[in-house]
Amino acid sequence: MSTSQEHQAYDFAYVQEKWLPIWDAIEPFKSGRADDKRPKKYVLDMFPYPSGDLHMGHAEAYALGDVIARYWIQKGFNVMHPIGWDAFGLPAENAAIKRNEDPRIWTYENIATQKASMRRYACSFDWDRVFNTCDPEYYKWNQWLFIELHKRGLAYRKDSAVNWCPGCQTVLANEQVVAGLCERCDTAVTKKKLNQWYFKITDYADRLLDDMEQLEGKWPEKVLMMQRNWIGRSQGANVNFLIEGRSTPVTIYTTRPDTLFGATFMVVAVDSELAAELAAGTAAEDKFKQYRESVKAASDIDRLATDRPKSGVFLERYAINPVNGEKLQIWASDYVLADYGTGAIMAVPAHDQRDLDFARAMKLPVRVVVETGEENPAETGIATTGDGKIVNSGALNGLSKADAIAAINKQLEADGLGKSARNYRLRDWLVSRQRYWGTPIPIVHCEKCGEVAVPADQLPLLLPDAKGLDLKPKGQSPLAAATDWVNTKCPTCGGAATRDSDTMDTFVDSSWYFLRYPSSTNHNEPFSRADIDTWLPVDQYVGGVTHAILHLLYSRFFTKVLHDIGMLGFNEPFTRLLNQGMVVMDGSAMSKSRGNLVRLSDELENHGVDAIRLSMVFSGPPEDDVDWSDVSPSGSVKFLSRAWRLSGDVTSKPGVDFATGEISLRKATHKALNDAAFAVESFRFNVAVARVMELVNATRKAIDSGPGAADPAVREATEAIAIMLSLVAPFTAEEMWERLGHKPAIATAGWPVVDEKLLVADAIEAVIQINGKIKERIEVSPTITDSEIEALALAHPTIAAELNGATPKKVIARAPKLVNIVL
RNA sequence: GCCCCGAUAGCCCAAUGGCAGAGGCAGAGGACUUAAAAUCCUCCCAGUGUGGGUUCGACCCCCACUCGGGGCACCA
C-alpha cells in the first residue's frame, strides 16, 4: 500500500530551489493592477535597518506579517504588502568610518543581502514598490516636507539645553534618551545649550491623545498606554504670584490649586532665566551661581536618582501668595524643571512628597490644608496626596478636593489671578543631527533674509560626496567642512549665504514612508492623492514594540500635519497594529557576547524556510517572546512532512465532487477552515496552526483506517490543509498543491468557502450537573430546546436516583450543552 | 515610587462565565524492520500562583497579596 515516493523523505532544500524561480515568473504578490476589482488591504511590516543580514527577529516579524498578507490574499483581497529600507543612520556612518569608505557602499551592500534573504524566506512582498530612505529620490521628499512644515511654523529653531551624547557627538531627541543613556551607544547623556531645529509636535498633543480613541481595541492597549503616559497631559491651573521688588508677577503651574493655602514657599528651576533674574543683585547671587554650576556638572544619571537628597539655594526674594497675602521665600532648585509648566512652582510640602522632602531638608514650614485622616506629614515625612476635607483655607474650608479645585479656579479667574491650564510631558521633537549620513536640512542661512527654504525646483538638495570629508564625530556636522557645498547663494536675494549643515533625525524618514509605497515611482510629488485614497490608511501594521513611542508617535504626528495641509483624508495612519515579541534564547535577548546567538542562516540551512516560519508562528501568541530553546524546528519539519505526505496519498482526481465525500472528515475540514480563519483574524496564529495539525491527524486517520485515500473528502481535506499551510509554509504548500494536480500559485488559490451546514454537529454531548457538579453526560441533538433538555435531564435514571424525590430549587438549562439542577 | 501586562501538565501553550486539554515538545510502550532511522498507533501527566468575594456554576468577573515581565521616572 505504500509507494517508494511516500517513504521518501520530504526534501525541503529541493522544494525551495524549485519554486523560487517559478514564483518570480508568476509574481503572485503584485498589487494594484489597474483592472483589479478586489477590495484593498494594506498590510505593512516595519521596514528594516540594513545592518548586516536578517536575523531571528526579522524572521519572526516577517513570518507574522506574511501570514496576515497571505491570508487576505486567499480571502480575495487586493493586498499591498510592500517593503523598503530605513537606510540612513549612525550604524552605516560608524561602519564607514571604521572601513574608511563611503557609507553608501556598506548600506547598499546590506540592502542587497537582506533583499536576497527575504526572497529566499518567501516573503510575499511586492518588489515593484521598493525604495530606500537614503535614495535622493526619497529624501528629496523629506526635504520637501520639511519645507512644508517650516512654512507653517511647525519646523523652527531655538536655543535650548538639549540632550547631548558625548559618544555619538550629536544631539538626541527626548525619546532617544533611555534612562539617561543614549539609546544607540549607552553613553551617559549630558546637557548642552545649542541652537537646534525642532518640529512642533506639542501643537498636536491634544489630538495625539484624543484621537487614540479611534485606536482603542485595534492597537495593543500597552502601546496606547505608553503613548498616553508619554504625552502626559495634566490638568491644573496657572496662578500669578506677585514678587516683592518686581513689576510683573510670576506664574506658577499646579495640578492642586485646592492646596493654594498650603503653599509655604516657592521654587524656581535653577537653570531657568527667571532664577538668574531673581538672584541678580541679591546677597545670594554668588551662592546661586555656584549652585547652578554644580548642577550643570551633574549628569542625567545623577539627576535621575529619585532618592537623591534635595538641594537648593534661597534667593533672598519673596513672593506673595495671592489668596492670603503671605510672604513666601523663593528658592532655586534642580528638582523643578525649567521646561515644564512655567519653570516655577508653589511648594505645598504637606501634600507633595518632593516639596516635603525639600522643606524638611531646608527647614521650611509645613502646613496641612487637606484633612485626609492620615498622620501629620511634618512628623511622618510622608506627604498626604489623597482626597479629604479642605482646612485652613478660608472660604474653601469643608470642601472636597474636586469642589475646592472648581471653587478656587473660579475665584482666581474672577480676580484675574489665574486660570485653569493644561500641561504636557511631551516636548517638541528635536530633529537636527550633527552627523553626515542623513537628509540635509534644506535651509539656507542668509544675513539679510534669515532662514530661506531651498526652492522646490532645486530639490533634492543632494548630500555631498563623502570623499574628502572627515566623518568622525566632533560635535559639528561633517557637512560644515564641505565648503563648496556649504557656501551658496541666497535663493531670495542672491547674496552670499551658507547652507544649514545639519542633517535630519532618521525618524523623520520613517514618519511618512508608508505614504510613499503606493506612489514609490512618482517623481512629481511625495505621494499622489489618488494613490493615497486607494490604499491608505494602513489596514494592518506589524512590528516590534520597541517603536511603541518614537516611530508610532512621530508617524501619527506627521499624518495629522499632512491631513491639515490637505494631503490626506484621514488622521490616523495605522488602523490596526500588531506588536510581535522578541526572539530570545534561554530567557534572555540573543547576543554574541552572551554566547546565546542563534544564526538565522544556520537554522534555515538545517530545517528549511518553512519549518522556521512555522516554528515562529506556532510558538505561542505573536506578542509573546519566542524562546528559541522552547521551540522545536525539527518538530515543525516532522509536521510539514506529515502534511506533505498526505498530498501523495490522495488518489482522487482534481475537481472531484466533494459533496460525495465521507461526512465526518468533511465536517472536520470545514470546521478547521472556519476556526483557522477566525484565529488568524484575531492574531491567534498558533491556534490556527493547531487546527491544521488536527485536520492533518484526522486526514491521516481517514486514509489509513477510515474511508481510504480515494474518498473525495480526503482530497477536500488535503487541499484545505495545503491552502491553510500556504500562509505559513509556502514552499510545502505549493509542492502539495502540485502533487494534488493543481497549477501554481497556491498563494492565490483562494480560501475554500465554508459550508455552514457542515459546521453543525450531528449530536452533542451535554452535561447534567447537580449543584454545579457533573453527574451525567447525555447525547442530544444540537437543536434541542431548553425545556426539552431539562426534561431529559430530570428523567435520567442517575439523576432521578440522586434527586430521590426531592424537588429542585431551580433548574438552569443551557441547550444544547448543559443542565444544572440546584437543590 | 507610579502605571500596565501576565501566572493552566516536566516544557511551550488552548479553553463566548458552562465537561480544564485543542495542538505541540519532551517521556513511555507497541507495530513495521535482520537492525536502525523514518513512519504509524497507543499511553502517561495538572485541577488553573495564594487568600477571599460575586454566581446555580469561576482559569475567566471583583478585592487583597505573592512572584515574573514591561513602561515611565523630581512633569508640581
Image: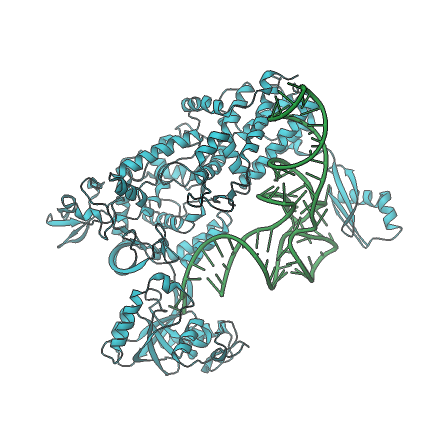
* Residue A365, horizontal then vertical, whole percent: 41, 81
Does residue A335 appear to the left or right of A647 in the view shown? left
Q: Which residue lies furthest to the right in this view?
A: A805
Q: In this view, does A351 lie above or below A672?
A: below
* Residue A144, horizontal then vertical, whole percent: 26, 44
- The residue lying at 18 percent from left, 41 percent from top is A468
Q: Colour of chain B?
A: green
Q: Chain A is drawn in which colour?
A: cyan
* Residue A371, horizontal then vertical, whole percent: 52, 78
Image quarter of the C terminus of chain A: bottom right
* Residue A591, horizontal then vertical, whole percent: 43, 44
Q: In this view, does A136 lie above or below A304?
A: above
Q: Is residue A773 above or below residue A718?
A: below
Q: Is residue A71 among what the camera can see?
A: no
Which colouring convention does the figure follow? by chain
- The residue lying at 37 percent from left, 64 percent from top is A302
